[in-house]
Image: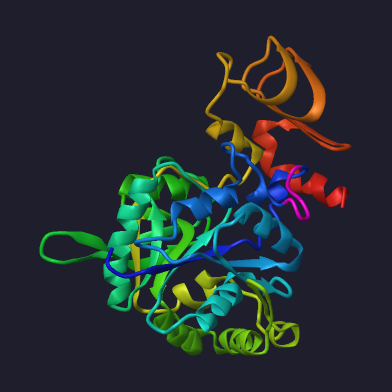
Amino acid sequence: MTLMIQPVILCGGAGTRLWPESRGTRAKQFLPLAGDTSLFQQTVARTPAGADFLPPLILCGDGHVATVREQMGDSEAELIVEPMPRGTAAAIALAVARADANTLLLVMPSDHVIADVAAFHAAIAKGVHLAQQDWLVTFGISPDRPDTGFGYIASGGPLENADEAWGFVVDRFVEKPPLEEAEAMLAAGGFSWNAGIFLFRAARMRDAMLTHCRAIFEAADEAVAAGMRDGDALYADALAFERAPADSIDYAVMEKDDRTAVVPVAMGWSDLGSWHAVHALAGDKDAGGNAVAGDAFLHDCRGILVRAGGKRVSIVGMEHVAVIVDGDDILVMPLARAQDVRAAAKARE
């Protein structure tokens, strides 16, 4: 890579699918769910400031500013504080409004797992070639199963130079499909999961937003111009920012623009979107496939996830169950029902 890349880390999610541990100021991205450091810290570490990458630009809400600063430690970063959530389009618009025109922005969610960082960097290098030619680049995850929980990206024609394929024209974006359609896409090939990771030249995205979602960009641009600085943080102006329509970057720009590209990559990616996924990724399971964090006694159990949260947990004769303890809240459920956690989180608000 020859150009410096500005990592843009989106920290706005609440992570309610990982309740009760994930909530409030301790949202999913700030928890050590797949290793000794938090998902946010792992995201920062993937693009270290130095030869290829600038210090990160971090988008977060006011409630997470202290946590971001704490977890960044002495590392350099700039924060843009969103007054209220308006979706990924408006968040990215804040970063675009703040950036120099020719800066390459690498937008990443803060709560994903990438096991093969070298493969990610190789994909970024391919994406740089395309972004320099004013493609809006998205990174697609090479699927290993017909998952119905992700959107998909259909690849069109290849984009290449004489000796290397850099990526593909995006043919279309596909909403989260039913199982039969997901199976058909996997069998056909040429489809990737949509991971929400993007690379583009700032001026190119600015022009795309002015074309496809002008109200969002103008509100964000004004919010940055009228923002208040506090040390390393720029607090976007609330009156301006609340005028931004709430939308995702996919709907607002990527699906509408005629010059979007996808770089497929297999990099051990997971959005860690459920306790089932946390169990699946746990690297220290016992012989029975049980993943335990904390003080837990298991007898005749298989496929269990326990996060004891400072309590003493005992489980006898159970299979494929999650037990998550956080303070006075205890969640017990079959791992197969992991997507139903939001019902409990809502009831306990």
The quarter holding residue 292 reads top right
Q: Residue at x 68, y 54 (%)?
A: 70
Indicate the position of residue 198 as horizontal and vertical percent values: 44, 66
The answer to whether residue 261 is left or right of residue 349 is left
Q: Can residue 177 be seen in this view?
A: no
- At a point 64% along the width and 52% down the height, the residue shown is 71
Image position of 346 (left or right of 174) = right
Q: Residue at x 78, y 55 (%)?
A: 24
Pinpoint residue 120: horizontal percent, then vertical percent.
Answer: 37, 52
Near-viewer residue (240 or 172) = 240
Location of residue 95 by image quarter: bottom right
Please say if 195 is above or below 343.
below
Q: In which quarter of the image is residue 309?
A: top right
Question: Where the N terminus falls, by quadrant?
Answer: bottom left
Image coords of residue 53 (percent x, y): 40, 63
Q: Is residue 141 above or below residue 282?
A: below
Is 315 situated above or below 211? above
Taking the image as drawn, is residue 241 in sight? yes
Look at the image and name its color scheme.
Answer: rainbow
Q: Which of 187 and 216 is in front in this view?
A: 216
Does the magenta segment cover residue 24? Answer: yes
Q: Residue furthest top?
A: 300
Is 234 on the left or on the right of 98, as rendered?
A: right
Chief secondary structure of the magenta span?
Answer: loop
Q: Which residue is drawn at 34% across and 47% down?
A: 118
Q: Is residue 42 magenta?
A: no
Magenta residues? 21-26
* Residue lying furthest front: 74
